[in-house]
Image (cartoon, rainbow, N blue to C red):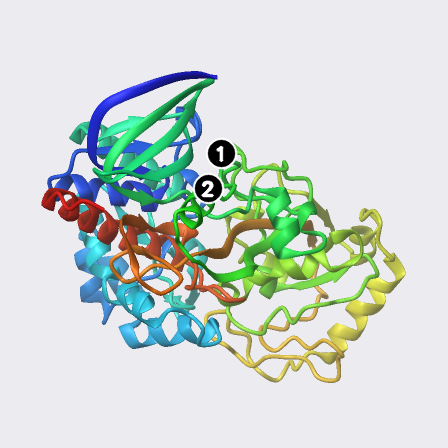
Amino acid sequence: MNHAATSTLYDVVVIGGGNAALCAAISAQEAGGNVLVIERAPHEHRGGNSAYTGGAFRIAYDGANDLVKLMPDLHPDELRNSDFGTYTKDQFYDEVIAMSGYRADADVLHTVVQESLPTMLWMTQHGVRFVPLYGRQAFKVDGKHKFWGGLTVEVSGGGLGLMQTLYKYAEKSGIHLRYATRAVGLTRTDHGWSIEVETEGTQQHISTKTVVMATGGFHANLKWRSMYLGPNWDMAKVRGSRYNTGDGIDMAINVGGVAHGHWTGCHAVFYDLNAPPYGDINLLNQQKNYFSLGIVVNADGQRFVDEGSDFRNYIYSGMGAKVLTQPGAIAWQIFDAKTSNLLPDEYRVKHATRYTSDTLEGLIAQFEGIHKKAVLQTISAFNQAVDQATPFNPAVLDGRGTKGLAVPKSNWAQPLDTGPFVAYAVTCGITCTYGGVKINPTGQVLDEFDQPISGLYAAGEMVGGLYYTKYAGGAGLTAGSVLGRISGEHAATLAKTKIKN
């Protein structure tokens, strides 16, 4: 391998190229740092997992006035015709920590919650535009868009638009950017840190006073998935970046960082059966997350989840694990005409594995590898079990459930009796992993004694200790932005003090 050296001593080197990394880089430069971003992916695939997301952000707000600050171009008609409600800091914190089984790092989570709205407002100063999440998180009830599940805003242009905006700002502001460069080693030095990188067969050492690690989790590392997540996880499709293989986690642990969080847990969803094995930025919307509007059956023709146990954005991240345990790791989501018109864009893309028919028999005849008679029996039993006396309201937990079924549906139960019918074949798509390294509220990586490793920070999906088993939709981008911004500023401030390790 060829070797090269650099004489530049950076104040802050950010390793990674997603939302958390760019927020760290921008924040570090604003704090006076000379900043370099090292992105493993080539230029055309930059943006990390963030580029593949829908772009929803979970933020704390006390009412529409807070949202107007964030979205100043909201039209008066939008305000009149929308019920944004409130989502207080206490609600945000209480929901996410409860979903972790009260295992989440309370101080780090508290920081994410408290700084969620201020950080989003900071992002708007750098060109990021937020808009109401009408398409995926609101249903029209009594003439008003009713938002549900603690989510009301997304980035204009989705995750890809977010990353394009952040990179545009970084380029304009003079932040140094290196693509197709993989960080493979990290070493303490007298001045701070030396980062060993590889670019097209050339090895180089980059000197810096501080480092912010934001390389994502290990969802694209088949070996690690098999080792840590368990059986069948080598069969999962990768929703996002193929470059998130745990490099940053490995490097941080090798210099004393402690492994932390839920290493056997991950965010994984119902995903199109025929989606490519890795995320393709030209074929987004492969996830199928609105199962709550219908039913889901496995290859034996049986339902295996309570599709209405909670709002979809509180339970969708666990569906990938459930479908992996089913025969063939495959399932079918089935809807009738009463709810299919409520399905969002992810169901309407041309590349969806979709089946349609005016009859249930005609629909199920098209399925391959399923017990077709059993499906019809399951649907018949389900239809008879629906409590039709309770009104259907998709914007609330309506209590319209089933009675007498081994696997109930707790909310939004509708008999499948009105054609045309539509179904989608799904498998498991893994989004991100929950295991990583431990940090404090300023983003410093901690060692096994909970002491900060001077000059080493982490943000984004490689941070362990925020999610255990369950995940609240939109929390990831928010946490990445908040902790990225804090880490970058803190790293640059430390660099300016010229403290030696």
Given residues 410 and 117, the one toward you in this image is: 117
Which residue is drawn at the image coordinates 32% and 42% (left, top)? Answer: 21
How dense is the environment of label 2, judged by Cα within 10 Å: few (below 14), some, or many (20 and up)? many
Report the residue marked by disc 2.
52
Given residues 103 and 395, the one toward you in this image is: 103
Dividing the picture into quadrants, the one containing residue 442 is bottom left
Label pair 1/2, CB-CB below 8 angstroms = yes
Residue 437 percent coordinates (x, y)? 42, 55
Please name the amino acid that badge 2 sits on.
Answer: Tyr
**Would residue 245 appear left or right of 44 to someone viewing this image?**
right
Report the residue marked by disc 1.
281
Which residue is drawn at the image coordinates 39% and 52% (left, top)? Answer: 256
Given residues 29 and 346, the one toward you in this image is: 29
Which residue is drawn at the image coordinates 42% and 51% (left, top)? Answer: 461
Residue 467 percent coordinates (x, y)? 46, 64
Looking at the rendered structure, the number of numbered marks drawn on it comes to: 2
Please name the amino acid that badge 1 sits on.
Answer: Ile
Q: Which residue lies furthest to the front in this view?
A: 190
| 3D distance between C-alphas at marks 1 and 2 | 7 Å
Dividing the picture into quadrants, the one containing residue 223 is top right
